[in-house]
Image (cartoon, helix red, strand yellow):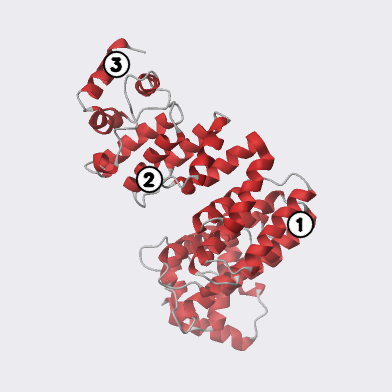
Amino acid sequence: MSADLAAEIVAHARADTLLDAIFNQYGRHWFKDDDPTIAALAEQHNQGAIDLLAIVTPESIEPYKGSTFFNGQHVYRALISQLDASAADLLTVVQTLLDGAGQDMAAGLPVEEFAKWCSLDPARPVELLALVDADFPNADRFLTIAIKNGVNVDRGHFLDRAYGFLTAGSETQKQAAINALGQVPPLDDADWARWLDAFTALVAGSESDSTSSTMLTAIARRLPNAPEKYRDLLADLGIAIAQTLGDHVLDTVARTVAFDLDHIPDRLLEALLDTLRHVKATNLGTIETLDFALMKLVEQGQNERARVLLDHLIRRPDDPIDAEKFDSFWYKVAEIGGDIMEDWIVTRLLDGDYALCRALDDNLFSPGSDERTLAIDFTRYSLSDPDHSYLARKAIGTFF
């Protein structure tokens, strides 16, 4: 480490300008985690020459906005796992950075590094769990990290605590424990029985929408590696949760179909798609995820399921969703082309519904879209003479 760099950092600390240097000077370089500047900052902190944590408060970071804030956050993200600090001090800084980042997609990056920090010393999960028990501010938001890392230290104790939070914890603690149990693999039949019994009790207890959505995520995480004999039970739990139809649950249903499609049993998938018929047109974030889910269905050849769901959403009498909201889906249909796109076109033209035909024209053949030739081999379809005449009229009315 450069002596000049270390002296510069210490001088900033003594002049009360270190935080500004981190956000406005060091942060602008977007250092890699092993950069000498990051190493120097961590070393000076760990030697007690500076305190990188005490200078971070809601008031001190308030002036830093936009890219300047995220430059500084990046420096702290790189530092967190390297610092010798108490769980309380580090947790406080991580929460302050989270609050400062707001809804940005990069907001959670310091949390990942805090989890890494927690994993590097077997005393740290215990220390973090003690903060939760002491009602230390915001500690329960990091309970998942304590449990996930704690099972590597004392599996029995931390699992007992996790299951305890399901019945005696606050809403935040319960959700954190559910999240952790979704990521700690059961090791044997006894583990599976305990897991399934606990989640069955939660489902029967009519949990809140947000807690139910956390449960559904945990179930989706367990499915890929679940023994075959437990998959039906997991599917039953998933179906029961999905049928509550809460906004958070439906958002998780869409995310599950979009990102876990390969691992969803067919019976559960059918139920999940049925619940997605109830997504509200005002829930734009869920619709964006649903768009991706429909695209994944088409990618995997499940065209009929995608078609049935999309048709319902577009033409339901109450609260229809604009077909243009599903731009990723339409792009995928056009990209695949061939028989897949032709089947979509012929099916909708034969149906004759104005909303469906307009959706085809607007999203596959609108001005500015890639030029596509409408040349369908109708011999692939069992069409009567009246069908041919109807299709011709409908095609002219729709596309010309």
Q: Residue at x 60, y 38 (%)?
A: 150
170 and 350: which is toward the camera: 170
Three-letter amino acid code of the residue under disc 2: Leu
Query: Marks 3/2: CA distance?
Result: 29 Å
> Foreground mark, 3 or 2?
2
Residue type of the residue flagged with mark 1: Tyr
* Kind of residue indicated by mark 3: Leu
Q: Label 3, label 1: how many angstroms apart (C-alpha)?
A: 58 Å
Q: Which residue matches tag 2?
A: 98
Secondary structure under the numbered disc 3 in the rendered image = helix
Across and down, in percent, residue 363 comes to: 43, 68
Residue under circle 3?
A: 5
| Residue at 78%, 50% in the rendered image | 190
Name which of mark 3 and mark 2 comes first in the sequence: 3
| Few, some or many residues within 10 Å of mark 2 (<14, 14–19, 20+) | some
Give yes or no for contact between labels 3 and 1 (Cβ–Cβ under 8 Å). no
Q: Foreground mark, 2 or 1?
A: 2
> Which residue is labeled 1 in the image?
230
**Residue 182 image point, x, y percent:** 62, 51
User: Which of disc 1 and disc 3 is earlier in sequence?
Assistant: 3
